[in-house]
Amino acid sequence: MIKRIVFLLIVIATVVGWAIPVRAADISKPNIIFVLLDDLGKEWVGCYGAEGIETPRIDELAEGGMRFNNAYSMPQCTPSRTCFLTGQYPFRNGWVNHWDVPRWGKGYFDWRKNPSIGRVMKSAGYKTAAAGKWQINDFREQPDAMVKHGFDEYCMWTGWEEGNDPSGERYWNPYIHTKEGSKTYTGQFGPDIYNQFLVDFITENKDEPFFIYYPLALPHGPLTTTPLEPDVTEKYDMHKAMVRYCDHLTGKLMDHIDELGIRDNTIIVWTCDNGTSKSLTNIMNDREVRGGKTLTTENGVNTPFIVNCPGTIPAGVVSDALVDFSDMLPTFADMGGAEPESRFVYDGFSAKDVFTGKVKNSGREWNMAMGSHGGVSTDKGIENIYYFRDRVIREERYKLFVGTDRKPEKLVDVINDPDEKKNLIDNPEYAAVVKRLYKPIEDMPVTDSDPVYTVIPDYPVYKNDGKRSKIHKIGHPDNPKGDHLELKKKEIEEYLPHIGRP
Ligand SMILES: [Ca+2]
């Protein structure tokens, strides 16, 4: 009889789409691994309905844990990563635009002036490590930047260092920065090195709580072969091989923590920093989805997001809860018993109770995403292009696009219109929805911050130096037509550095 009741409860839970927690999450100071892919949307992940690609190990994480439908990253590398690291939205920490620090110089992610999740976890007794892509400090100038940001151990692709061509390689013959310095690893595949570094770190620290930030270099361009598929040559075959290698490396990490017997005390959060390159299209749940990198449409920011920890995170759950990248710092701090540094303001909410199945909905009423493309190097440092960057505010069903003039410009019903084609903003039936979704905008600063960092007088400046500050800024509320009218489009474009490698 009891068995039958339990069975019925499970059936009911499955039907209504959420689960009965196996047991309360009382594990103290769990290990935490944050796995962050580079440039991959849901349309390439099996458990989200991707066709023509299999990702069995990632799907296994989802089957044994919680898979989110409404998790937001930011639209491009720098805004996403700094949001994750700081627990602050781009308008607050200033990294609204994408910026390849080693390549474009001038400024950097300053440990003195920004929060860092690494430092927060370290303050609670965690051993911390990072491996993969960093890109927001120039290790030639700041070789110990990772330690300053709170990572005890690290193994990072340097990012493309201006004037140092070997540093452009993140895959075969990668150029990697460790405590021993930076060098090329001839004949080796970078993603294997980053992964093995973490496997070794876990082995060494299995008996104490550890926090790992694992921003894979994959599957960002340039397209490459992998050790498992060394002969692929066509564009889509190479991309798929790279996705499959992400799956392989995810599995390798899972197998290792299984072998060490620490799987049920290790929270894995598996996600991606932004949508796939726009040059790649796939079918997901019978719908064609083009890559949405740099866009605030769902293909750019509604990221694959899976949380797994057997016994603590309920298994087989698909969650519609709202979470975004600013939530990670407060969530991991909450799980680890850490206190975020009190001198900073944070934008996120702890999602611990959502992850552990104690509540169905998070503390948030909306998600937010914003920021992409290069900033500007001026006589005042790195500045953003706009006074107020366009952004989106999203509930479970409705999503509001707000323009650089701070005005609402588009409302979509993402459930019934997944391609976000039909603008409901002029339909009076939705006036209350627009008003509700616009309220958070009214509470945000009128102008976005620019990146903050300690100016180093002899810091290298590579490009676009000496442009007068502010003439480029677009959409100031006191001057809504903008000084940009004085500039021709071509001149504005001249301020924009190239956007990464292909
Ligand atoms: Ca990216």
Image (tube, rainbow, N blue to C red):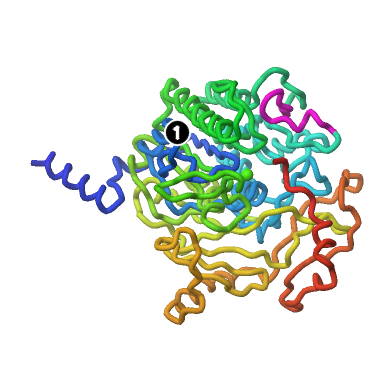
Q: Does 476 appear above or below 142?
A: below
User: Residue extending furthest left?
Assistant: 1
Q: Which portion, as a residue range, is magenta?
A: 164-178
Q: Quadrant of residue 477?
A: bottom right
Q: Quadrant of the C terminus?
A: top right
Q: Quick check: is 501 in the magenta stretch?
A: no
Q: Quick check: is 172 in the magenta stretch?
A: yes
Residue 370 point in image, percent of width and height: 61, 59
User: Residue extending furthest top?
Assistant: 187
Q: Residue at x 49, y 39 (%)?
A: 270
Residue 306 point in image, percent of width and height: 44, 42
User: Which element type, helix, strand or loop, lies under badge 1?
Assistant: loop
Q: In the displayed structure, does residue 337 sit left or right of residue 446?
A: left
Q: How many numbered marks are there?
A: 1
Q: Amino acid at mark 1?
A: Thr
User: Residue extending furthest front?
Assistant: 234
Q: Residue at x 82, y 45 (%)?
A: 105
Residue 129 point in image, percent of width and height: 61, 32
Kindly identify which residue carries mark 1. Answer: 55
Q: In the displayed structure, does residue 298 sit left or right of residue 311?
A: right
Q: Residue at x 61, y 57 (%)?
A: 89
Name the quarter showing ligand 1. Answer: top right
Question: Dot 1, how many residues are within 10 Å of its Cα: few (below 14), some (14-19), or many (20+)?
Answer: many
Q: Does 431 appear above or below 329?
A: below
